[in-house]
Image (cartoon, rainbow, N blue to C red):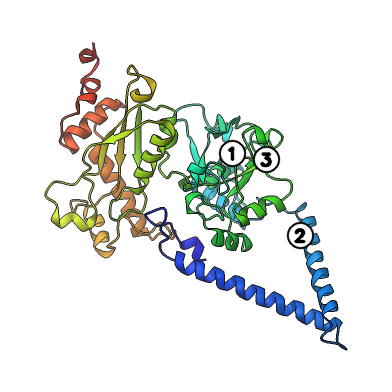
Amino acid sequence: MLSLRSKPGKKLSQKAGFQALLLAVAITFFLLLSIVISWILLLLGSLRSVQNPNDWVAQLFIVCFLTGAMLLFGLVMGLFININKFSLHGTYRNRLIRAFLAASRTKRNPHLFTGFDPDDNIALHELSSERPLHVINGALNLVKGEQLAWQERRAESFTMSRLHCGSFQLGYRPSAEYGNAITLGTALAISGAAANPNMGYHSSPVLGLLMTLFNVRLGWWLGNPGRAGEKTWRRSGPQYSVGPLFSEAAGNTTDRYNYVNLSDGGHFENLALYEMVLRRCHYIVVCDGAEDPECSFADLGEAVRKIRIDFGIPIEFGPMSIYPRSAIDTLKTPGHNCAVGRICYSLVDGADAPDGVIVYIKPALYGDEPRDIYEYSKRNQTFPHESTSEQFFSESQFESYRMLGAYTMEKLCTDCTGDFDCFIRDILTRHLRIEPPDWLAVSLAGPTAKA
């Protein structure tokens, strides 16, 4: 229960919240488990050697026999237990499908008891070919990675779309065949599988073992999309569960095995900016809804760092005037809800390659919001950065976040009829109240100026 509520610290080497308590609890649990197992084995051994309680040979025989019997039982059951089905992933996926996919269907045939309708879920490759192209991000765990430079990140990016699934490092497979035609619901659940024994740079050996033993596993096992998975990438999961389960418990996940362990995309990079830059998107809008009460921009910093290391592409921002609530009373300059940055594609792709534009949007509170938002913020001092571990929303909480998002976008979006240059120009002049930088001015001036 504590592991589900815990979250990583602001720094990669830091553990926040319950992490220190979790380590103590885990160690205590294993000590008590060892004592209980030893006591049971001694008790059983004494039953065999009633006449001579000091007959250590008989007791040793009982210990070895029971150990071998349990080991054999576990190995055999590995043939019958599906490691993906026997986890919390299915429960999580069903709730996501019911909440988001089923809500868009007017005609349903739900089960009388559960309320679920199998037709709510569709195969990922059946998504509409019209825009937009949805790219769902996950993390491929590399806790036992062979690249020394990745010892901190312990994961690589993994994407799923209607076209293909895979990673830049390993390769891609068609979604119509990958994972026995992976469904949209499964892809969504993988992308949000925050609680998992292997969690990228959040992984902890002791907690990983404890979470595996108690089956606190939201992740998913699929065939390796690279060469190692030539015979497995079409399967819906491993046919034998002992190996993958041991890999989760021991932190032995890698991209060299026949199957890979997938979890929340935030275990690698939380904004999905990495994959958009990889695809050389010219216009990128990032909405950062992470818990960041001090506006340290941790997720943005992680994304910018990984992009520069892996692709050699810098992302540059000018002064950012997005402020935390704690600084409202001391502000000397107006606070804003977004920032505009430059993605320097030209440094890698050549001088003729146009640089990209990124609009970074983050929830902020400055006191000029609608009265219902203002009232809620007075009752909740951490709003709009309340803990993301709390997943039970009240009506006022949900509406306050929804209205703050709507109010923020109303300030940023003007009547540009889909013209992204107009959108950026209005953000700079009307919201940020600055002139476009030189590298962007010609692009925003229009076709005539460019000619």
Residue ranking furthest to the bottom: 51
Image quadrant in which you'd find residue 237: top right
**Could you tell me residue 31's position as x and y percent?**
61, 74
In this image, 178 relative to 71: left or right?
left
Quadrant housing the C terminus: top left
Q: Would you name the residue on which mark 1 appears?
A: 122
Residue ranking furthest to the right: 51
Mark 2 residue type: Gly
Marker disc for residue 12: none
Residue 54 at least partly seen: yes
Q: Mark 3 packing: few (<14 Cα in 10 Å), some, or many (20+)? A: some
**Could you tell me residue 84's position as x and y percent?**
65, 50
Q: Mark 2 packing: few (<14 Cα in 10 Å), some, or many (20+)? A: few
Question: In front: 276, or 63?
Answer: 63
Mark 3 residue type: Asn
Q: Would you name the residue on which mark 3 appears?
A: 258
Image height check: is 346 above or below 270? above
In this image, 378 relative to 216: left or right?
left
In this image, 217 relative to 11: left or right?
right
Residue 417 at least partly seen: no
Image height check: is 78 above or below 348? below
What residue lies at 62% left-to-right and 76% top-to-bottom? Answer: 32
- Along the polypeptide, which appears first: circle 2 or circle 3? 2
